Amino acid sequence: MLYRKYRPKLFSEVVGQGHVVQTLQGALTSGRIGHAYLFSGPRGTGKTTLARIFAKALNCAEQCKDGNPDNNCESCVSFNNGSSMDLIEIDAASNRGIEDIRGIKDSALVSAPSGKYKIFIIDEVHMLSKDAFNALLKVLEEPPAHVVFVLATTEPHKILATVLSRVQRFDFKRITPKQIFTTLKSIAAAEEMKIEDEGLWAIAFSSDGALRDAEVALSKLRAVYQKRQIISADYINDMLGIVPRKYHAELLNTLVKGDKSTAIGFIHKIHDSGVDLENFTKGFLEFSREALLAKVSPATLTAMGRENTLQDEISGADPKLLIKIITLFTVARSEMKHSPIQQLPLELAILEIT
Ligand SMILES: Nc1ncnc2c1ncn2[C@@H]1O[C@H](COP(=O)(O)OP(=O)(O)OP(=O)(O)O)[C@@H](O)[C@H]1O
Ligand SMILES: [Mg+2]
Ligand SMILES: [Zn+2]
């Protein structure tokens, strides 16, 4: 799997999450190490990755001036090949009970085999049972000096306030499509795979901010890749079941022009070619929303990392019209489930818009 092969080993290799990286490096260089951290945020955005780099740096014998691990000393090597006894990773999804936490407590009391830090990474910590949570709290109240906890979760709202008050919390962000695109491009180059940029963008947009998901998609391509082949965007769209963005742009431009006949013909064509209309409409709504944001809040679009792709795709559209299109298509999408003819709600929406 490419996502294992390209898992960052240094802080500088982590994409995005600048605020988290800086604070962790700062803690390492100043020597002010907390005893409990909470890494919260969407899946596949680098929580486990950063927890491991941090743990490795804590115990590195030749830690760099900027807090990075040297990836070369005995300790780093053992972290990198997964044999370090100083690092204990627990998946709370499958170890939910109080016994599991008691085990952690007992282990925390024993000093680290290396004589440095003992680091516990507890993944999906929101899955712990109530009793287990309380037991964990007890450990967090008086952590032994040599212990560091990194709790990770995709659902921070499920973490008790009493736990939150004892941890230093970091909120991880979704990776932007642009950052995902750039990462995929460099991995593809390293793997000597030739892929159309448009195809890499398609993966980037469909990964919903999870870099791991994007890298998994790239692994699927590599599995079928033949030397010197060029993978087309169409192939990728097919593989991922994605409707190309250019179709969304085409429909939106047709609606903006008020061309009802072409718009209805377009829906017919899409439906005939076997595309799932609900899925198509969802993508179309996302696209139209971006077109609207480009008019009313370009900064939001930039923050989403989508600023560069929209320019050429849509011609001038009045925000009022975009609002009408989005509203009517949203209604049409929910009506599709009950309609005897799947295209009908879309056709009616088109007639009302144009
Ligand atoms: N911010 C990132 N920078 C670089 N690579 C990343 C980043 N986020 C994810 N990846 C890639 O995705 C893989 C999985 O990331 P990681 O395990 O850190 O995600 P996670 O946030 O812990 O996800 P989960 O919530 O599912 O446990 C990494 O091995 C790496 O290849
Ligand atoms: Mg993880
Ligand atoms: Zn080292």
Image (tube, rainbow, N blue to C red):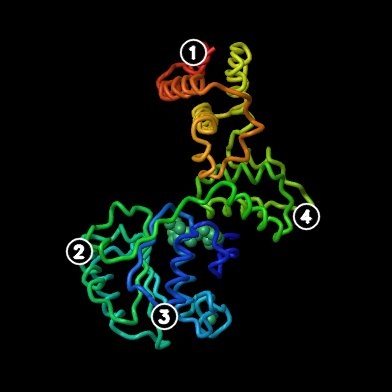
User: Which of the numbered marks, if any, corresponds to residue 227?
Assistant: 4
Image x and y of residue 202, in percent: 61, 42
Query: Where, quadrant-wise, is the N terminus in this rendering?
Result: bottom right
Q: In the displayed structure, would residue 121 be above or below residue 337?
A: below
Q: Is residue 133 left or right of residue 83?
A: left
Instruction: Using the image as rendered, state which of residue 174 and residue 305 is in the foreground.
Output: 305
Q: Residue at x 59, y 33 (%)?
A: 243
Q: Which image quarter: residue 145? A: bottom left
Which badge, 1 or 4, is on the more N-terminal residue? Answer: 4
Q: Earlier in the sequence, mark 3 or mark 2?
A: 3
Q: Nearer the viewer, mark 1 or mark 4?
A: 1
Residue labelled with disc 2: 131
The residue carrying mark 3 is 86
Q: CA distance from mark 4 to mark 3?
A: 42 Å
Frontmost of labels 1 and 2 is 1
Q: Residues within 10 Å of mark 3 (few under 14, many from 20)?
A: many
